[in-house]
Amino acid sequence: MLVLQGTQLKDEILKLKKEKDIVILAHNYQIPDVQDVADFVGDSLGLSRQAAKVENKTIVFCGVHFMAETAAIISPNKKVLIPDLDAGCSLSDSITLEDLKKWKKEHPGAISVGYVNTTAEIKSELDYCCTSSNAVNVVKAIPENKDILFLPDMFLGSYVAKMTGRKNMYIWAGECHVHAGIKSEDVQKKLDQLSDAEFMVHPECGCTTSVLYDVASGDYNNRQVQILSTEGMMNYAHNSKAKQFVVATETGILYRMRKQNPEKNFIPASEKAECQYMKMINLDKVYSSLIEDKYEVKVPKPIADKARLAIDRMLSIS
Ligand code: 13P
Ligand code: SF4
């Protein structure tokens, strides 16, 4: 069997996707090689929008399983492939369908808002879906007098509650092990060493709550602190005049940041912030996916039809 490597493998992937009319979507946390062969690299919201927009009949989704499921739900006439079926997500695993049904029963009449990092089954039970870039606006769109069940990320939930001033929001105690692991101590150490650096934080981070508190109490003095989704970080990095940034999220995003802003310096808040699920996808698996049409992500129609309502609401709010 012919074993392809490096540039040859990349070239073969680029050739195959053209021949087979396949589009490759990759999340900002994918390894550099995978980002290089993708047609679009972006955050959860951006990739969902691309999945709906592209005309290709097949999408190879280089990200984690819930993202490929979301693409399959909003594009029921397209074939969605994921190069590794085991690419899961600790955050989406933090709530089960039974948990959600029980929680909803305990709060009759409440509106359920779920982060896009959830399974299709969970989405089918939600009123609204949201991503880190539009969570605040989704909650703002819900009448003040309605109780809200927000799930599954507690740090994003607390951030949204703080930003909207909402008092009637119940928050599920789930977390992403990668972002929860970025602690205030890690961040403080880096910031102390870099007095000129601006600071970008993903709202899933364990340090988000204390960062908000510190910003409110003036602890960051004049330092610019931004709480942003991964694509929000990309845009901010590009538009800011600063030359140095401490970045609190999964380290995969640094490749694209450095590539697009070669004159700027990006420092991870924690070098350990790596998502092993995102890193399961590599060029060999992308190649197999293109050659063998694997692994197709299918969502049963009754679940997809219900989940699509919540996802469509997410896509309509920016
Ligand atoms: P965004 O790219 O939407 O900011 O989400 C980050 C994330 O953790 C995806 O798993
Ligand atoms: Fe899930 Fe966290 Fe990995 Fe994102 S970084 S895919 S939330 S485990």
Image (cartoon, rainbow, N blue to C red):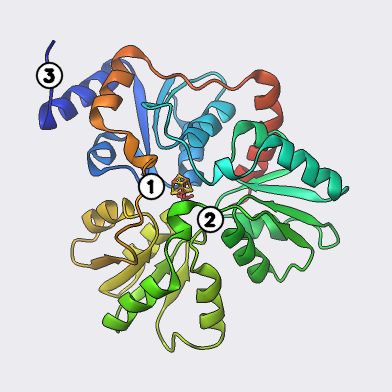
Q: Which residue is mark 3?
A: 3
- Whichever of labels 3 and 2 marks the residue nearer the N terminus, that label is 3
Q: Secondary structure at mark 2?
A: loop
Label 2 within 8 A of ligand 1 by Cβ: yes
Give the x, y percent position of residue 297: 50, 22
Quadrant assignment for the N terminus:
top left
133 displayed left or right of 164: left
Question: Few, some or many C-alpha atoms within 10 Å of disc 2 (few <14, some 14-19, many ≥20)?
Answer: many
Mark in front: 2 vs 1: 1
Pick the residue in front: 55 or 25: 25
Relative height, residue 46 to residue 269 (above, below):
above
Give the residue type that dot 1 points to: Cys
Q: What whole-number distance in Å separates the C-alpha atoms at marks 2 and 1?
A: 20 Å
144 displayed left or right of 80: right
- Whichever of labels 3 and 1 marks the residue nearer the N terminus, that label is 3
Residue at figure coordinates x 56%, y 71% from the top left: 209
Q: Which residue is mark 2?
A: 133
Q: Secondary structure at mark 1?
A: loop
